[in-house]
Amino acid sequence: MSPIPRDTLGLALRPRHYPDFFARPTAVDYVEVISENFLGPAPLPRERLLRARAKGPVVLHGVGLNLLGHAPLDEAYLDALCRLADLIDAPFVTDHLCWTGAHGLSHHDLLPVPFVPELVALAAERAAYVQRRLGRPFGVENLSSYVDFTRSTMTEWEFVAAVVREADCGLLLDVNNVFVSSRNHGFDPLDYLRAMDFSRVLQVHVAGHSREPDGTLVDTHDHPVTDDVWALYARAWELGGPFPTLLEWDEKIPPLDEVLAVLARARTMREGLSTPRSPSNPSAEDRVRISFTNPTHDAKNPTLR
Amino acid sequence: MSAPPTPDWLADFQHRFGAVLREPLDRATGTLTARVVRYAPDAVREIRDAANASAAARLAVYNRQYWFRLFSVLQTAYPLTTHLLGAWRFNAYAQAFLNAHPPRTWTLDDVPEGFDDALPALLGDDPARALLTDAARLDAHWRVLFHAPDVTPFRPGAAEAARLPDSRLVLSPRVRLWCERHALLALRPQLRADRETPHAAPPAHAAPAWFALLAEPHGIRAVPLEPREGALLTLLARHPVRDALAQLEAETPAAERAALPAQTQRWLAQSVARGFWVGLADTPPNPTLTE
């Protein structure tokens, strides 16, 4: 598989944009698709995925892995995900550091857990297992969250950093999610960013959010990226750039040109910002060669789940 | 790396949280409202109050998201039904359906499965029950055809031709036979973005109209069928060919029977040429494949 160069811009490709995206020369360096939309047998989505792949790299972003569900990981789901990643030779695959279902039910939402060491161990073991099964880099994404559990004994950033470190896997750092959670829970988002190991960041997501009447911020992906989130993105770039940057827009999606204009702001604002060059934050050239320990296809090993 | 155990409390925690998510929204005020007083106290006690919102109010964000996401999935899967009912009424039936059939798989594509079967009972004695039931069935056909896998059409050779009279033809998963009493197919491409206002009922056909719905590489196409042709294809999908032809003949007025052999030969050949079938079977059919 070919890694994605660090200083690149990507778009979360959604059906609303298919006509324009396929009709024009490619305007982004890579696209990301929702894995679950292409795991079924329907030929039409698969054909569109292959058309997208013919235009450039495609990374897979899942919402159904259920990494922190109480039940074991779904091996049939993982089989299908591995086949899909192989089909398009995905540079990397990501999903969320969350649970999505329990007790035989699927809630189809990205649900939080208390931040405790025993769940670090569980998430890390499972993320490492998924990465071995995929045979390619796998990353977990931080959530937007609306609740703070009394059971938590760690901060969210300690939890996320520990999972990624112990799993030896990648991180999909969503700066909008960091911002949303920081406002909802009253922490400094810079504390969060400073705790991240940017050498493990596979990509950074930016997106828009909404505000509830009581002031709670909700990760709706239905607005332009706010200035506050762009400012946080700039700080992330200064702390750990360069990294691939991808814009998500999932509701009230405007025409492709408008979305691309929002994405272009990432490039504009990065101009003039410095990036660190240190052993813990490798240069752009070094980052292209980042890989994770032994990412080879393993046979299923149920004892590891 | 050794496998850490799943913490004992995790399953209980996720059970409590899941129950909060699935708590039905209240419709009494004319808007969909979370009934936070019905959340289990144990679930609320696990959450810290925020500066601007109580623990229950924060849980309500997830409760609303759960329902709104699933309403959106069902509305998207059943666009005709949504427009004929209007989103508000549709959501009431969707909520009742989802209470009885909460999602169980990782794919949203499975969420709408069975709503068309459940709707007639949910509608009760609604005067538009027949129309709405047909609309839901047509929506369900559309959804199934969109997800239908590629298949190799049946091209009978000499051996199959010999087996044909005593075998049943297996309808392709990329084909559905559709008979409608109202102009639902014509309405489908005219649907507005606005789902809130119920759409007027489409006009009734003078006589039931038959179509074959075909999943093609770039979409779904409706091919009109002659009424007796539609009846024949439906019988062929349900019975051995010999029995299907006999039943069609019995249902045909005597004055029209003379033309029937040539017609059936033509319709059968045409259906094979169009790729309506994938093979022969001696087993009973799947009753959901045809109307």
Image: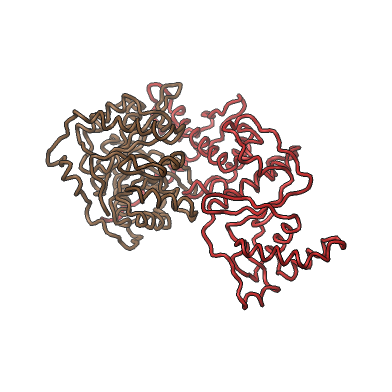
Residue A112 percent location from the top left of the image: 38, 38
Residue A266 percent location from the top left of the image: 28, 32
**B188 or B55, nearer to the observer:** B188
**B64 or A92, nearer to the observer:** A92
Which quadrant: the C terminus of chain A?
bottom left
Which quadrant: the N terminus of chain A?
bottom left
Residue A155 percent location from the top left of the image: 28, 34
Number of numbered markers = 0
- Vertical side of A215 occupied by B252: above or below: below
Residue lying at the far left of the rendered structure: A278
Q: Residue at x 73, y 59 (%)?
A: B229
Residue A194 appears left or right of A32: left
Q: Is residue A177 in view? A: no
Residue A88 appears left or right of B184: left
Q: Is residue B190 in view? A: yes
Residue lying at the far right of the rendered structure: B255
**A108 or B256, nearer to the observer:** B256
Residue A55 appears left or right of B253: left
- Vertical side of A195 occupied by A2: above or below: below
- The part of the image, by quadrant, that contains residue A161 is top left
Q: Residue at x 21, y 36 (%)?
A: A241
The chosen color scheme is by chain
Palette colour of chain B: red
Palette colour of chain A: brown
- The part of the image, by quadrant, that contains residue A226 is top left
Residue A92 percent location from the top left of the image: 30, 49
